[in-house]
Image: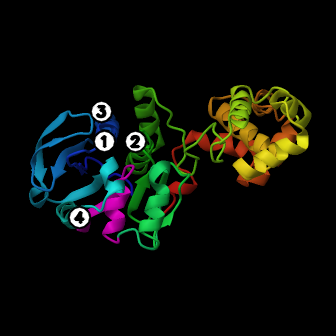
């Protein structure tokens, strides 16, 4: 959707008592800054009844417009709040969002705002994401939604959903790029001193392995030790010696508590570290060495096995907000 010269886009943020403040202020500041470089957005706060709503930290948002009076919209953005995942969404909020979504060209959600869209059936048969902590709940409550728990933001048709809180900034930068081009989005990211480069399909987790927490104090200490310095000597014998157990017993502990082997877990930790290093601008060789994977060839094999891409391709994706999750 390319911006028409001089066109003004009307963007409504749906807010409610308990709304997460950064879900609103982060995206709205992105759009405000974009308006300094391109045709401005018209921003308005909308709530089911209008008036004042109280955010999760207790700060009031005043002067919200009743949903019935919001008028035509280019983009509707539903902010999140923990209560949306903890209980069924109230009818009043559902009715307001449903009416607004019908007349919006583009519908987006930040964090648990996806629960509102899902409750309305708008995400049925579509790919969507939310905060990692609530992704399982979203999938169980709405089995027809194809939940992608590890994505920063996902585009499916005219619906765009994002992960938790700060990921709303990533989502909004992608919307700005869609409207005004990569140069404007890049300038906004630079002005806000944030990464433009995190693509929609990038993991919500940059450095933590996607495994459950260890139960025993012995394994928790060892895990913390490895995470603190993934490039150190963490061979089987070295880890077993630090834990004061035999290699065989250490393997049993990993299977019982983490559902994997020490070697596989370590490889994933080092891969996550290498991803973070590439994001931060390190070379492929530098990322391989600093992550503990050692060589470029080893890094390439691990990327291919776990991510289906190469380190260079992964790094090159960071010239734009567009990623696998941002495609329609």
Residue at x 41%, y 72% (from the top left corner): 124
Residues marked 2 and 3 touching at CB (< 8 Å)? no
- Helix, strand or loop under label 1: loop
Residues marked 4 and 1 touching at CB (< 8 Å)? no
Pointer 3: what residue? 36
Residues marked 2 and 4 touching at CB (< 8 Å)? no
Measure the C-alpha gap from mark 4 to mark 1: 18 Å
The quadrant in which the N terminus is found is: bottom left
**Total number of numbered discs in the rendering:** 4
**Crowdedness of circle 3 by 10 Å Cα count: few (<14), some, many (20+)?**
few
Pointer 4: what residue? 94
- Helix, strand or loop under label 3: loop
Mark closer to the chain start, 2 or 4: 4
Residue at x 53%, y 59% (from the top left corner): 148
**Crowdedness of circle 1 by 10 Å Cα count: few (<14), some, many (20+)?**
many
- What span is colored magenta in the figure? 101-121
Residue 189 coordinates in the image, percent (x, y):
44, 33
- Kindly identify which numbered label has been placed on residue 253: none
Pointer 1: what residue? 20
In this view, 74 is above or below 198: below
Left or right relative to 309: residue 173: left
């Amino acid at each position: 959707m390319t911006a028409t010269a001089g066109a003004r886009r009307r963007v409504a943020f749906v807010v409610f008592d308990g709304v997460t403040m950064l879900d609103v202020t982060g995206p709205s500041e992105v759009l405000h800054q974009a308006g300094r470089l391109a045709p401005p957005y018209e921003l308005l706060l909308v709530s089911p009844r209008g008036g004042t709503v109280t955010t999760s930290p207790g700060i009031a948002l005043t002067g919200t417009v009743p949903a019935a009076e919001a008028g035509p919209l280019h983009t509707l953005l539903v902010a999140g709040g923990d209560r949306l995942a903890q209980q069924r969404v109230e009818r009043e909020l559902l009715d307001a969002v449903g009416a607004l979504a019908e007349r919006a060209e583009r519908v987006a959600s930040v964090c648990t705002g996806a629960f509102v869209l899902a409750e309305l059936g708008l995400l049925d048969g579509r790919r969507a994401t939310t905060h990692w902590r609530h992704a399982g709940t979203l999938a169980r409550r709405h089995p027809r939604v194809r939940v992608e728990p590890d994505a920063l933001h996902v585009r499916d048709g005219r619906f765009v959903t994002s992960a938790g809180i700060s990921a709303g900034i990533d989502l909004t930068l992608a919307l700005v790029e869609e409207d005004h081009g990569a140069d404007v989005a890049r300038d906004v990211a630079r002005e806000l001193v944030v990464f433009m480069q995190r693509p929609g399909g990038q993991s919500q987790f940059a450095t933590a392995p996607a495994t459950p927490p260890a139960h025993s104090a012995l394994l928790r200490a060892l895990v913390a030790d490895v995470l603190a310095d993934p490039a150190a000597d963490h061979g089987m014998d070295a880890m077993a010696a630090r834990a004061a157990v035999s290699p065989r017993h250490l393997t049993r502990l990993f299977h019982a508590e983490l559902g994997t082997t020490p070697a596989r877990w370590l490889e994933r930790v080092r891969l996550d570290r290498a991803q973070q290093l590439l994001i931060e601008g390190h070379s492929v060789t530098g990322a391989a060495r600093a992550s503990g994977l050692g060589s470029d060839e080893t890094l390439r094999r691990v990327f291919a096995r776990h991510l289906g891409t190469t380190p260079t391709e992964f790094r090159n994706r960071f010239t734009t907000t567009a990623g696998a999750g941002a495609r329609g």
